[in-house]
């Protein structure tokens, strides 16, 4: 299983967020702005990771349709040959 940079960073931010919230609740921890900063960082990492996944999906779709276009072209050529051998108008 291959981990992406954004996934690792996201999990690190989740762990940091849990530590900061626990520290804030049970002790005299960091300010609310520090916790908010980690939450904002987590959201940004998720957005960048989502953008990367969308890009991979678009490229896969584009390549899939390109391969399908080649297959349809081959099928048309074979259909033309079959029609020619059967002497049927297409």
Image: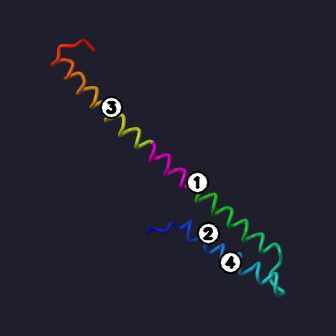
Q: Earlier in the sequence, mark 4 or mark 1?
A: 4
Residue under circle 2? 10
> Which quadrant holds the N terminus?
bottom left
In which quadrant of the rendered image does the C terminus lie?
A: top left
Nearer the observer, 77 or 90: 90
Give the residue number, with chain letter if any, for mark 4: 16
In the rendered image of this protein, does residue 83 appear above or below residue 53? above
| Majority secondary structure in the magenta region | helix
Bounds of the magenta segment: 52-61
Residue at the (81%, 84%) spot, across then down: 29
Pointers 1 and 2 in contact (CB under 8 A)? no
Left or right relative to 7: residue 79: left
Residue 46 coordinates in the image, percent (x, y):
63, 61
Mark pair 2, 3: CA separation = 42 Å
Residue 89: in magenta span: no
Of the numbered discs 2 and 3, the one sitting upstream in the chain is: 2
SS for callout 2: helix
Instruction: Kindly identify which residue carries mark 3.
Output: 72
> Residue at 73% of width from left, 65% of height from top?
40
Question: Which mark is in front, 4 or 3?
Answer: 3
Would you name the residue on which mark 1 appears?
51
């Amino acid at each position: 299983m291959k981990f992406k940079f954004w996934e690792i960073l996201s999990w690190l931010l989740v762990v940091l967020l849990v530590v900061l919230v626990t520290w804030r609740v049970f002790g005299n921890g960091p300010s609310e702005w520090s916790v908010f900063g980690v939450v904002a960082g987590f959201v940004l990492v998720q957005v960048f990771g989502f953008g990367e996944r969308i890009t991979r999906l678009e490229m896969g779709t584009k390549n899939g349709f390109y391969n399908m276009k080649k297959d349809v072209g081959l099928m048309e050529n074979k259909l033309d040959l079959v029609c020619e051998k059967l002497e049927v108008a297409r």
